[in-house]
Image: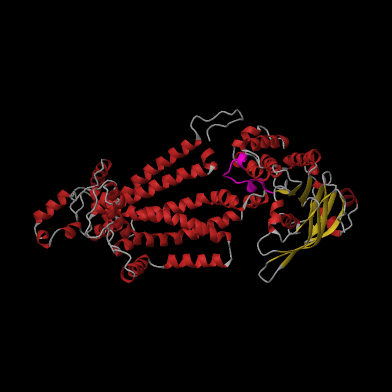
Amino acid sequence: MSADPDTDELLAVENLAVRLPGPDGPVPVLEDVSLSVRRGEIVGIAGESGSGKSMTARTLLDLLPTGAEVSGTLRFDGAELDHRDRKAMHAVRGHGIAMVFQDPTAAMHPMLSVGRQLTEHMRVHLGLTRTQAKARAVELLEQVRLPDPEGALRSYPHQFSGGQLQRIAIASALAARPRLLIADEPTTALDVTVQAGILGVLDSLRSDFDLSVLFITHDLGVLASLASHTCVFQHGRVVESAPTADLLRSPEHPYTRALLAARTDPAEVP
Amino acid sequence: MTTVDTGARRRPRVPPFVRYLARRLAIAVGLLLGSTLVGFLLVQAVPGDPVAANLSDEALGDPQAVAAFEERWGLDEPLPVQYLTYLANLVQGDFGMSQHTGRPVLEDLLDHVPATLEIAVPAFVLSVLLGIAIGMFAALRHGKAADQAVRVGSLLGLSTPPFWMSLLVLYLFFFVLGLSPGGGRLSPEFSPPPAVTGLYPVDALLAGEPMVAWDAVQHAALPVLVLTLITTATLVRFVRSALLEVLRKDYITAAHAKGLPARTVRYRHLLRAGLVQIMTMAGLTFASMLAGTVLIESVFAWPGVGNYAYASASALDRPAILGVTVFVAAAYILINLVVDLLYGLADPRIRLS
């Protein structure tokens, strides 16, 4: 079992299985998934598309399609989290666990101002006044190193580039002070040059706020300098789980080796 | 794009939204002009001789009477001259004289348009509210029994011919239940209130005659009901599919992931995004209501635009047909202009770029 009953533990997932309704009965998408994240730790989840990476994230936030069957145990922040108890699951959203999506241009509402999207959940979870929420939003945008935070609050998503939007999305995810951030391929839709900046922001947030991050990617190399621990997913199962350095140096599972071989190092691209 | 803004926060002299509206307005004027030309040519192309349609057999035998009729209506002039004359008069608010009522077309329109508005406006408001409520209800229960029920119901509403539904409703509420006073705008014992807005319930209240107002409302109730049912059926389907499309977007998932209350996601995020599409459809629906729903109006003996258009067409009354055409075209164009304006207000991507 990968989850140590460590006092440092923030999230533990044990024997998680998910089945989605299909035309010929339930289709298993996750089987016997176990992983754990400690406070202030970045854990990587790697695997190709369809391997169950995003399903894991969606299960944690109860964002699965209707009719999904979930089993297994979840423990978050020292308490058991019952996945059948929707109220309890939803109470964790935003405040306990937050998420950053792959395509920031699709994950921001095109008709609502950045200020509104940054503050609406702050006011719900933290009970801040409009002025307090605005001040915090400016602070957050400074932390993700977005130029002119005041002006950004009055702007709309279409006025920003993908990289800027992803910074805004990260700020928005952090707005209600979550303890775990799920980053679902947050750099895949961005230029290689912009990627490094986003990764830097995530790492500094981790060290500054003791934030834990579950970093989902299809690119094992991205995890090298970022994640202390990595789980490799294939066909809805965790096929290998080890400290990232060990995993990269001596991958045990053939699928991990294949993933590593398939990788193109951005530094090698002329 | 004429200028490239290089970070130097310089605002263009004309705000983008004003430019957007100015362009829409110019297009609207062009469309209106074009629609008068098309309308004019179509009326010419209608087979049938207006002289024969409007003069008695006796007068038709008299070449002088025929010549006098042709001269009076300008039928002896070449076509381009006829069109330009029509246009020049139109700009001054002169739609010509109706041949079958013998009154200025403008006056006829001013009588019939309020009658249509009297049923179209309440039916529009009701069906937009119902369409959004029911469409959203179904979209949020996609694939479940409630959704299926809504789909079947709206399909029934769509596939029932309007005149048939009118007859059913009239039969039920007038003959069987006796709840409705029947066709027309007012019961025979009342005379129309002095015209201010042309809407009987409003004018009757203004004249301090609540009984007349109540009678007018009762008369309008059934046509409003039929129009609402049919329009709601259309809008429900549209709202449902528009919202289903939005529900698949990442930003809705993201809003849930932020831990916002379901209500907030539903009204602020989901409905807001679907509204632009819904507005387009609602605008078209309203315009088609103003064009008059001939079949409903004739069952309820409702003296609206549809009935006037029908009577004018039967009489081959060219000025009246053209008058209705121009009115309907103007209504469509104006409503589209309003929708464009609302677009800009709803969507910052239009407003700001």
**Chain part drawn in magenta:** A101-116
- As drawn, is B322 to the left or to the right of A8? left
Q: Position of residue A80 (x, y in %)?
A: 78, 56
- Choose between A160 and B124: the one closer to the eye: B124
Please determine whether, in this image, residue A171 is positioned above or below residue B309.
above
- As drawn, is A249 to the left or to the right of A171? right
Residue B113 visible in this rendered orientation of the protein: no
- Taking the spot 52% from the left edge, 42% from the top edge, the residue there is B350
- Taking the spot 31% from the left edge, 56% from the top edge, the residue there is B214
- Choose between A90 and B351: the one closer to the eye: A90
Q: Is residue B193 magenta?
A: no
Residue B147 visible in this rendered orientation of the protein: yes
Give the quadrant of the C terminus of chain A: top right
Q: Position of residue B248 (x, y in %)?
A: 61, 55
- As drawn, is B118 to the left or to the right of A143? left
- Taking the spot 30% from the left edge, 65% from the top edge, the residue there is B299
Q: Position of residue A29 (x, y in %)?
A: 74, 63
